[in-house]
Image (cartoon, rainbow, N blue to C red):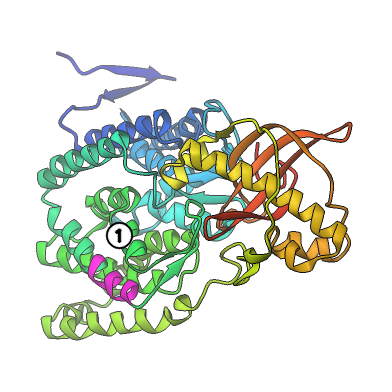
Amino acid sequence: MPQPAVTIRGTTYPVLLPSWRDPRLHVTATIMALHVIGQVWLGFELSIAQILVALATCAAIELVLVAWERKVIAWPASALLTGNGVAFVLRVNGTEHGDWWSMQGWYIFAATSALGLLTKYVVQVAGRQVFNPSNVALVVCFLILGTDRVNPLDFWWGPWSPAMALVYVVLGAGAVLITHRLRLLGIAAAFWLCFAAGLGVVSALGHCIWARWSLTPVCGTDFWWTVVASPEVLVFVLFMITDPKSIPTARGSRLLFGAAVGITAVVLVAPARTEFWAKVAVLASLVVVHVGRAALSARPALSLTLRRPALLAVSLPALLLVAVMVGLHAREPLPQATTPAASAGALAARPAVEIGTLPPVRVDDAVETITGSLTQTEADAMGRQLAESLLIEAKALEEGDDAMLQSAVVGKRLEADRAGAPNGVDRRFSELTAVVVRDPTNPQAIPRLGIHARGTTADDPFDAVFVLARAGSTYLVADELTPQAAGLR
């Protein structure tokens, strides 16, 4: 069969079509399968349009550059892999799951994808690219824009479910197919073993981070398992670290490379206090090692010295010690990590009140995602105790009884009541929904549970979100927000 070709302005360009045996297509198929699972079942805050922008940007640039340099029109397999990597990890704040054609931050996806693709051609040492394109572009994007504009995909994708099981099946199949075929399983294993072992030491000492998917700080063993078993980290291991064009060619050097990335990741993660910085640290570890490797390539004698097993045996524990030392402050209590709790004995002054009939409490999907499960009985108890707390608050303000007031409200609500805020009003509820309360100004803030309530006060309608704080088995009111201030859309 003759090779297809096209003629453009008098120049004939052979057309190189994709081969089903190309490992890059297998990687792309794996990532696309994860995209589908995330969009259909896991609530990825990513639109189809954003994915297409990333893919189209990389494909267009590579088609033009290859046609100009080699006078052929080649299927942009590597470019599509770069665009897929950017789209899979990058999240632009304000993108809602289910808004499939949202162009929110499209220029961020385009610029990040273009930067990654161009590093293949611009940043080279001895004719070889230095960085994994999507990895270095994502790190630059996160460092420049910060968590107020963009965020990486969460470590934790959701509670265990058939969809999560399918994620690990897809990742496992992709890993075996791709790394075995390219003989790269060793580098992936070297990274994961060093990373898991090093992070285990840091976690055992009580490391904690804030995460937007947890109602409490994620610490110790929970932190370790969440990170080392995260699908996002596995994607990083299997499809970024194992990029054949940006890693050493010798088997021994590859194992050393993987181990170096793993230990570097531990050192960078150790001081992180939020999930954002922990995720960026993992991604940045590969960039750091790439830079180090490029620098060493200019000093062959030093590079050979660093490969000595004795020096490696000393350097890895030394780096682990560095990780422990730089992470000391991350084991201190996280400030403002949780809603203030009621003081000991405060509930002793909580009187019994009659609240009448309440509507059943609907449970928002976001609550199920974070808590894993919230039964209807538990949700109705939250609504009932909210109504009780508001009645007790009104009674305490009327009687000037501060002890009774503390049995109903805490935190900012208590401060406002003591300052004379007009909170002691009679409310009649028509609709109650258990929700996750987020701080729209701080994407990394720990979420809180609340009740989104609608109804009337006297003859006036109200629409408010009451932030709840748990004291034993009782929910108290910690704050009252508008739906917008509570991060509800």
Q: Looking at the picture, how far across and down is residue 437, in whole percent?
A: 61, 48
Q: Which residues are magenta?
A: 196-204
Q: Looking at the picture, how far across and down is residue 116, in whole percent?
A: 43, 48
Under tag 1, what secondary structure?
A: helix
What residue is shown with label 1? 225
Q: Residues within 10 Å of mark 1 (few under 14, many from 20)?
A: some
Picture quadrant where residue 364 is located: top right
Q: Is residue 104 above or below residue 396?
A: above
Left or right of 472? Residue 328 is left
Nearer to me, 267 or 273: 273
What residue is rendered at 32% in x and 42% in y? 160
Left or right of 426? Residue 254 is left
Q: Using the rendered image of the protein, determine whether residue 110 is visible from the camera's viewpoint.
A: no
Q: Using the rendered image of the protein, determine whether residue 300 is visible from the camera's viewpoint.
A: yes
Q: Is residue 422 above or below residue 305?
A: above
Q: Main secondary structure of the magenta part?
A: helix
What residue is rendered at 30% in x and 51% in y? 240
The residue under label 1 is which amino acid type?
Trp
Nearer to me, 452 or 441: 452
Magenta span includes 199:
yes
Magenta span includes 456:
no
Nearer to me, 51 or 443: 443
Left or right of 384? Residue 121 is left
The image quadrant where one finds the C terminus is top right
What residue is rendered at 62% in x and 43% in y? 384
Q: Looking at the picture, how far across and down is residue 460, in whole percent?
A: 87, 33
What residue is rendered at 36% in x and 74% in y? 267
Nearer to me, 146 or 253: 146
Q: Looking at the picture, how far across and down is residue 68, in whole percent?
A: 39, 35
